[in-house]
Image (cartoon, rainbow, N blue to C red):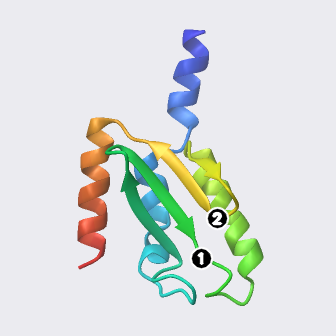
Amino acid sequence: MIYIQKFNERYQPRLKDTLNSLKSYFTTNGAHNDYLLNQFIVYGNKLVIELDIPSGFEGGKPERDRVKYYLSRAGFEPVGTSQFIITLSPTDLEWVKDFFSNSSE
């Protein structure tokens, strides 16, 4: 069992890598929401990502599906059709707050 855990830790995409690869979506304007991907923290330690991708791209559905795939591979759980949620550790929570405060500047 420990080998499976080590394999998953090594090859599972990390939260930081996923958010860094999607950084441009957090700053590109959407039609229905402020950005193509909106984020907010609920209950103190849960990060919610809301998708508004079809509004900003001509090929919106494939792009949306690609982002959903990246989020689910990073451990996000779908909530409805356009939101994903993940529970953050205290270390990840601090990093996420810093990441989004720096990306909005």
Q: Residues within 10 Å of mark 1 (few under 14, many from 20)?
A: many
Q: Percent position (x, y) of residue 70?
A: 61, 55
Q: Left of 76 or right of it: where is 66?
A: right
In the rendered image, the vertical position of residue 8 relative to residue 60, given as above or below: above
In the rendered structure, which amino acid carries the disc numbered 1? Asp
Q: Which residue is mark 2?
A: 82
**10, 58: nearer the viewer:** 58
Q: Residue furthest top?
A: 1
Q: Percent position (x, y) of residue 31?
A: 57, 90
Q: Which residue is mark 1?
A: 52
**1, 90: nearer the viewer:** 90
Q: Percent position (x, y) of residue 21?
A: 48, 64
Quadrant in the picture for the N terminus: top right
Marks 1 and 2: in contact by CB < 8 Å? yes
Query: Would you identify the image quadrant in which residue 103 lies?
Result: bottom left
Which residue shows up at 56% across the image and 38% down it? 12
Which residue shows up at 75% across the image and 84% down it? 59
Q: Is residue 1 visible?
A: yes
Element at label 2: loop
Which residue shows up at 70% across the image and 61% down it? 81
Which residue shows up at 24% across the image and 69% down it? 102
**Mark 2 or mark 1: whose residue is earlier in sequence:** 1
Q: Is residue 14 visible?
A: no
